[in-house]
Image: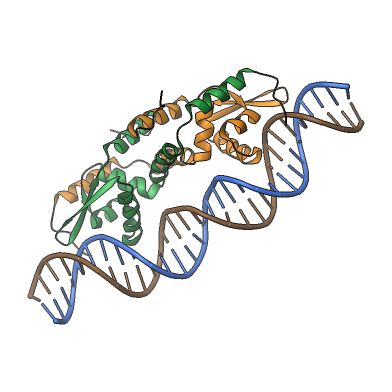
Chain colours: A orange, B green, C blue, D brown
Amino acid sequence: MELCNHDHDHEETVHQAKIHAMSEEDLQTICSVFKVISEPSRMRIILALMEGELCVYHIVEAVEGTQSAVSHQLRILKDNKIIRARRDGKNIVYSIADEHILNIIKMSRQHLHCEVSE
Amino acid sequence: MELCNHDHDHEETVHQAKIHAMSEEDLQTICSVFKVISEPSRMRIILALMEGELCVYHIVEAVEGTQSAVSHQLRILKDNKIIRARRDGKNIVYSIADEHILNIIKMSRQHLHCEVSE
DNA sequence: CTAATATATGAATGACTATTCATATATTAG
DNA sequence: CTAATATATGAATAGTCATTCATATATTAG
């Protein structure tokens, strides 16, 4: 593989791609956000919390998961600052911490035609 | 774990979450899109193609990958209708096929402050 | 047809990760 | 303090997946 002589515009496109390339850090940032919300079990939790704050027991009920699995995913969401936790007596109440993620999900649902039905 | 009596609003929130719940199909759709673009190697390819169409050789050059790895990722992007391929002589020229994905990425970059520098 | 070029692909491998199970920690009631 | 409740967590497991290596396919030049 030596040359691609069928279209010299490609050389310029490659040049532009290199100039406009995201920093490695930004690339990791944006990709890790997509990765976190790409897991259905986590997306379900986020969607549930979009309706309002919930304690673990009710999140488990809303997403129909097991306590342990939900708790592990809550940890990942919290570590990624997508949700926040506050203690309220015996319960830990979770809520959305990042409005940007909400907007990304909302806009994506519109684009992918996965909006709320009503 | 029997009751959560510290806040009865949670019951209503769970109710709303169940009513507004996405269909399983939509959930898979949106999550699989996020999954595809959550891999840095694939995101690099998409970002390169945002500058213009490219043949495989030039994609390899733009993203600084190996031919085989890039080819495998191109396949996944094509299977997911994010890019399209057309043959041009000895080369296969790839280009973005889904404007929605572009918008999602652009908006996400704004939200996450990963915009182009200039 | 043959050689060279461009791209694709199958299998193997290693890395990552979601879930489960068992258990630990924290809070409150009594 | 003790029991019960609510949540978190560590280890094990199984499944997924990105990359690599070797090779196959397709196109063009001669």
At horizontal 46% and vertical 24% (from top left) the residue drawn is A99
Judged left or right of residue B15, residue C20 is right
Nearer the observer, A32 or B2? B2
Where residue D6 appears, x then y in whole percent? 71, 29
Nearer the observer, A21 or D6? D6
Nearer the observer, B76 or C19? C19
Where residue A98 appears, x then y in whole percent? 49, 27
Q: In this view, does A58 lie above or below B88?
A: above
Question: Which quarter shows the C terminus of chain A?
Answer: top left
At horizontal 30% and vertical 50% (from top left) the residue drawn is B78
At horizontal 69% and vertical 26% (from top left) the residue drawn is A91
Where residue B77 appears, x then y in whole percent? 33, 49
Query: Is any atom of residue B112 visible in this view?
Result: no
Query: Is any atom of residue A9 visible in this view?
Result: yes
Judged left or right of residue B41, residue A9 is left
Where residue B11 appears, x then y in whole percent? 61, 22
Nearer the observer, A80 or A106? A106
Q: In this view, does B23 lie above or below A99?
A: below
- Residue B56: which quarter of the image? bottom left
Question: Which quarter shows the N terminus of chain A?
Answer: bottom left
Judged left or right of residue A89, residue B45 is left
Disc tally is: 0
